[in-house]
Image (cartoon, rainbow, N blue to C red):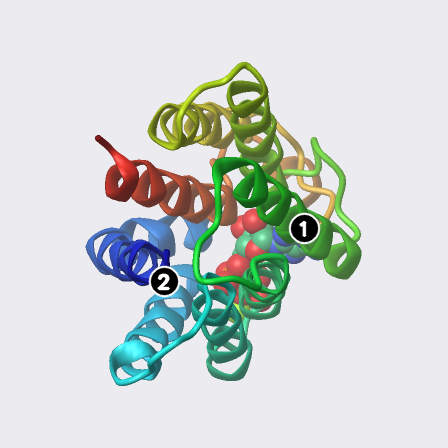
Amino acid sequence: DTDLARTWVQAIAAAVDKHKDHLTQLDSAIGDADHGVNMKRGFSAVTTALADYKPDTVGAVLVKTGTTLISSVGGASGPLYGGAFRAMGKALDAPTADTQQFATALAAGLESVQKLGAAAPGDKTMIDAYAPALAAFQQHVGAGADFAAAALAAADAAEEGMRATTPMQARKGRASYLGARSIGHQDPGATSTALIFRALAEVVAT
Ligand code: ADP
Ligand code: MG
Ligand code: MG
């Protein structure tokens, strides 16, 4: 419901706050050392925007989150995550959502990232955490798992995908400018995506 959506976004903000320096450190190795700062600025703005917002639908919370990320984050991650949250929100136009509807929304979010960023799995981006997380969520929902179990599987898969970015060579984003020198470093965006799925698992845990 709308309260859970808000709690999820607040949990993401708390996780970003906690891991800000780590995200920036990862981005300093293969980017421009601002991913933690970008995520922190974005989710601080989202926390403020949601503070006295009275949404009617689950989707409204997520659309507001996405719009705020787009307007407050300068880096690539702002429009990518912003577009993803907006796409998820547009797919959830009701006061409540079931696990199947949430799976559909997560898929719309990934589709938005791929449309905007034109990256594929294996390019060493947030997609390498998002795509396996979505697949795990869908698989568990299809097998009859409840929301908590599906979200836990998604969070585990996102972290596995995040770790798998280390040996990859970047083909999209700033890290791609490094060519083979991007190999051996974990992708910052895949790391923040793993935080987003872990936050979901934690807020829906039974
Ligand atoms: P910037 O690179 O503009 O400084 P950030 O540092 O906030 O932006 O975000 C970098 C992250 O964005 C990367 O680690 C990667 O995961 C993600 N990213 C960059 N370009 C793309 C893309 N085209 N598609 C998907 N994700 C991307
Ligand atoms: Mg950066
Ligand atoms: Mg930047």
* Front one among 32 and 164: 164
Q: Specify the quadrant that holds the N terminus.
A: bottom left
87 lies left or right of 94: right
Q: Specify the quadrant that holds the C terminus.
A: top left
- Crowdedness of circle 2 by 10 Å Cα count: few (<14), some, many (20+)? many
Is residue 7 in view from this perspective? Answer: yes
Q: Is residue 11 above or below residue 144?
A: below
Q: Residue at x 62, y 52 (%)?
A: 109
Numbered circles on residues, count: 2
Q: Give the mark toward the camera: 1 or 2.
A: 2
Q: Is residue 34 above or below residue 50?
A: above
Q: Amino acid at mark 2?
A: Thr
Helix or strand or loop: what does disc 1 sit on?
A: helix
| Label 1, label 2: how far apart the Cα atoms are | 19 Å
Q: Where's residue 122, x and y in %?
A: 70, 31
Is residue 126 in view from this perspective? Answer: no
Helix or strand or loop: what does disc 2 sit on?
A: helix
Q: Where's residue 148, x and y in %?
A: 34, 30
In the picture of the structure, the residue carrying the numbered disc 1 is: 108
3 lies left or right of 143: left
- Crowdedness of circle 1 by 10 Å Cα count: few (<14), some, many (20+)? many
Instruction: Check mark 1 vs ligand 1: CB closer than 8 Å? yes or no.
Output: no
Q: Earlier in the sequence, mark 1 or mark 2?
A: 2
* Front one among 206 and 78: 206
Instruction: Check mark 2 vs ligand 1: CB closer than 8 Å? yes or no.
Output: no
Quadrant of res 173? bottom right
Q: Amino acid at mark 1?
A: Ala
Quadrant of res 130? top right
Q: Residue at x 33, y 80 (%)?
A: 54
Q: Where's residue 56, x and y in %?
A: 43, 74
In the picture of the structure, the residue carrying the numbered disc 2 is: 2
